[in-house]
Structures are given as C-alpha cells and as structure tokens.
Amino acid sequence: MKESLSTIRDAIDAQRPVLLPVKQVQTPPLGWIATVRSALGMSQQVLANRLKVAKQRVSRLEAREITGETTLAQMREAADALGCDFVYVFVPRVPLQEFVTRRAEGLARRELAAVERTMQLEDQETPITDQRVQACFQPDFLTELHTRMFGEVWTWAGQYRLHDVNIGNTEPHQIEVAVHQVFDDARAWIEYKSFELAEIAIRLHHRLVLIHPFVNGNGRSTRLMADVAAKRLGLRPFTWGADSLAETGEARAAYVAALQAADNHDLGPLLAFAQS
C-alpha cells in the first residue's frame, strides 16, 4: 500500500512543473463565466438558452462564481456552453514526497523531544558515558530513527539498501559492518575525549552520510541523528543553516560544499554550517 501511494505521489510530482504556471493565472474580477461570455459578445439570455435555464439563473450563476458558491458541475456546464473546457487542479506548494517526508521528520522530532523531556523529568540527565548516551550511539538507534521518520513513506524504512547507488562509498554487503564501525569509533571518541562534543556529533553525521546506508532519507535521518547525539551529549541541536536543505538554494549549496570539504578531511566548514 505504501509503495502504491509513493507511486501516486511520484506521478503527481512529475506533473508539478507543468502545473506550477497555472498558479500565475489570475481569475477575472467578474469571474470566468461573465468575462468569457462578454468576450464572445454573448448576452445572458443567449447563455441561458444554451443552458436551458432562465436568464435570472445565469445572473445568479455569475454572481455566485465571484463569491465561490458555484459547484464544479455548474462551472463545467457553463464552460461547455461557452465552448470552453473547465479544468481544476491542485498544485502542490512543494513536491508531495517532500511534504510527506517533512511531516514524517517533524513527527519523529516531536516524538524524540517528548522522550527527552520525560527523561529530564525523571532526572535521568547523567554523564556522557552513561547507558542513555551509549544507547544513542548504536546502529539499532539509527535504523529505528529512520523507521520513525519514514515508516509512513516507504515500506523499506529502516532497512539498509541492497544495491549500489551513485552516492556513498560503501557497497551494500559492507554497509552493516561499516555502520557498526562508525558507532564504535564514535563511542571511542567520547570515551577518550578525542574531539569536542559538537565535532563528535558532526563527524558521526558525515561518516554515516558517506556510507549512505539507506536508499533514501540519509541526509535527513543522519542530521537528526547528529541532533539527538548532541542533545544526549548535553548540547543544543544544530541549526543546519536555519533553512530547508531539501530544495536547491544557497543553504543546500553550502551544505553540499561543506560535506565535500569533510570528504577531503576538512570538517571545519560542516561544523560551522551545522551551527549556523
């Protein structure tokens, strides 16, 4: 069922570039029926004859179009009588897949925030080497996080990818071992205080992005992973440029450039961006 919904969303998103210009079309002040009728030099009586209704009915129809009280059936009949096609569309403000993933991410963040607040109320704020922190820095935590974020979107949410992708440097059969190694390293960084706490969370994010463990949703889930890690380590969540990174723009370009710098062993830009 989820896969079929995803297919429907993909089909609508594919039409979005064609639909976007429709948003620029302005409805005439007098409404479409009256405007087109007048442009054709047609009186209300002639249109009434075509619709087989009284002239007063056309007058009311034109008035109700302006107030939004007409039905789709009435608009369709009037358009046909005027030699036009009546078309109505929903134009997604953002791609539907993006809308769903944003909603899923928001739900996951709220759920995790509620868990964090409960732990604080129970006075479970303890040193960075405690079990709560250790539980966060585990592979199972990442897969559970991905499932919470995208379980309503993809049936395979929380499952490592089974085929190669253009992004990532890890073959499918190596993903599980690679992810385990990343979290082993992260726990060691904490134990031996190898880096500042914020850098540990960002290094974790970068290493996981580099592996690209899932087919999709890697950036979102690993950024949230870094946020949760930061909170568990006693820090505030990162702001990630204070803008959406899903769509093309300055923030995303800066984020991608920072990731590329980290690929070349310069973590500074990525850490600075995450805190900006």
Image (tube, rainbow, N blue to C red):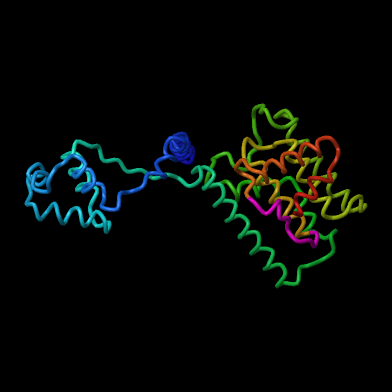
Residue shown at 66%/28% (left/top)? 165
Residue shown at 9%/47% (left/top)? 48
The front one of 108 and 202 is: 202
- Residue 113 lies, in percent from the top left, at 65, 62
Queried whether the magenta region covers residue 235, the answer comes back as yes
Queried whether the magenta region covers residue 214, the answer comes back as no
Residue shown at 23%/54% (left/top)? 70
- Is 210 on the left-hand or right-hand side of 53? right
- Is 25 on the left-hand or right-hand side of 119? left
Magenta stretch bounds: 233-243
- Residue 155 lies, in percent from the top left, at 54, 40
The front one of 106 and 150 is: 106
**Would you say the magenta stretch is mainly helix, strand or loop?**
loop
Q: Residue 76 appears in which quarter of the rendering?
A: top left
In the rendered view, would you say 270 is above or below 172?
below
Residue shown at 37%/44% (left/top)? 25
Q: Residue 233 appears in which quarter of the rendering?
A: bottom right
- Residue 32 lies, in percent from the top left, at 25, 47
- Residue 85 lies, in percent from the top left, at 25, 37
Q: Which quarter of the rendered picture does the N terminus lie within?
A: top left
Q: How many marks?
A: 0
Q: Which quarter of the rendered picture does the C terminus lie within?
A: bottom right
The front one of 87 and 154 is: 87
In the rendered view, would you say 12 is above or below 188?
above
Q: Residue 205 appears in which quarter of the rendering?
A: top right
The front one of 29 and 121 is: 29
In the rendered view, would you say 5 is above or below 136?
above
